[in-house]
Image (tube, helix red, strand yellow):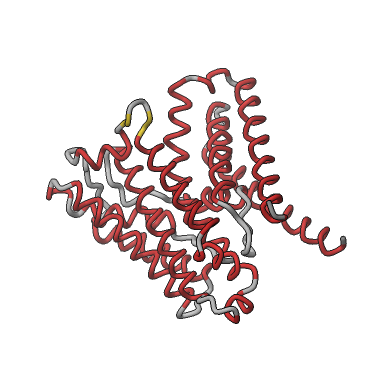
Amino acid sequence: MNYKNLIAFGSNTNLLILFFILCACAVFISPAFLDFDNIQNIIRTVMVLGIIAFGMTMVMILGEIDLSVGSIAAFSCAFGGIFVDSNSSFLVIILTLLAGAFCGFINGIGVAVVKVPSLIMTLGTMAIIRNAGYIMTNGQAAYPTKLDYYMLTAKGYLGIIPIPVIIFIILSFVCAIIVRFTTLGKSFYAVGSNPVASLLSGISNNLAKIIAFTVCGLCCSIAGLIQSARLGQIDPHMGIGWELTVIAIAVLGGASLYGGKGSIEGTIIATLIIGVINNLLNLMGMSNHSQEVVIAIIIISMVLLHNFGNKKNKNG
């Protein structure tokens, strides 16, 4: 195990310790935390945001950010929802996934080729895509309840395991393999750490960014599909505010806003931590506004810790 892997292992170990401490605190504060229905609710809720966080982690490793994730989730599902009356789950699912990937591709082109800063590019597409969804649907929800396979993505089981959990596990393995073991994944770290050096070494910075944003868009559409099936409606208002929680998951999992750092393994653990925190705050009767404040504090704290760590390394 090399030095970088040792650091990552230590970081993930600390996250696991934090997760178990939070679970213990949650049980102490509210015994209802261990109720089967409550645990199932935590899993179903965090799986959606965790899936998007996989894509966000890739984007952040490159030193970029995507603020349009919630809008992409809503738009892609709304686009697929136009064809609900076809009674074809396959058609609706495929169109949903293609719409999400296309939105991500547009973000990637804007950032990599047109050279618009990702903060500005995705802030713009967040508004454009969100309102395009409203215009396309007249702000009305569609109901996919007659699409059996569509509904299975959220409400089906394989044995005793919910389908969303299976989707989450499969995607986590695929994304982890891409990031950790493939040439593409290594190029993400190279570009995020030093884009000039990566370009001189023959890596296509533009291609890496386009792929990362496209994957992120695809993850958004998958998450939106699961959420729509879970609620039994395709709502163009879905996903508002998701970007804050998704960024918090990625940052808590070890991704740096400055690029070059992050792992899917860390994102998985961070997903569970954020799920426990949100659920604990719910059990304590705290409002959604209070929960958003906590999430924002987590993001700021992790950035400050990152800066503090960098200063110590330079001084040391």
On screen, residue 70 above or below 102: above
On screen, residue 27 versus residue 39, left or right, reads right
Residue 271, percent across and down? 53, 42
Residue 2, percent across and down? 70, 55
On screen, residue 86 above or below 215: above
Q: Residue furthest front?
A: 1
Residue 20: quadrant of the picture: top right
Q: Which residue lies furthest to the right in this view?
A: 316
In the depicted view, which residue is nearer to us: 157 or 289? Answer: 157
In the depicted view, which residue is nearer to us: 280 or 252? Answer: 252
Residue drawn at x 67%, y 34% is: 17
Residue drawn at x 46%, y 64% is: 212
Residue 165, percent across and down? 41, 37
On screen, residue 268 versus residue 18, left or right, reads left
**How many labels were placed on the picture?**
0
On screen, residue 45 above or below 112: above
Residue drawn at x 45%, y 64% is: 213
In the depicted view, which residue is nearer to us: 255 or 158? Answer: 158
Residue 135, percent across and down? 27, 61
Quadrant holding the C terminus:
bottom right
Residue 232: quadrant of the picture: top left
Residue drawn at x 87%, y 63% is: 315
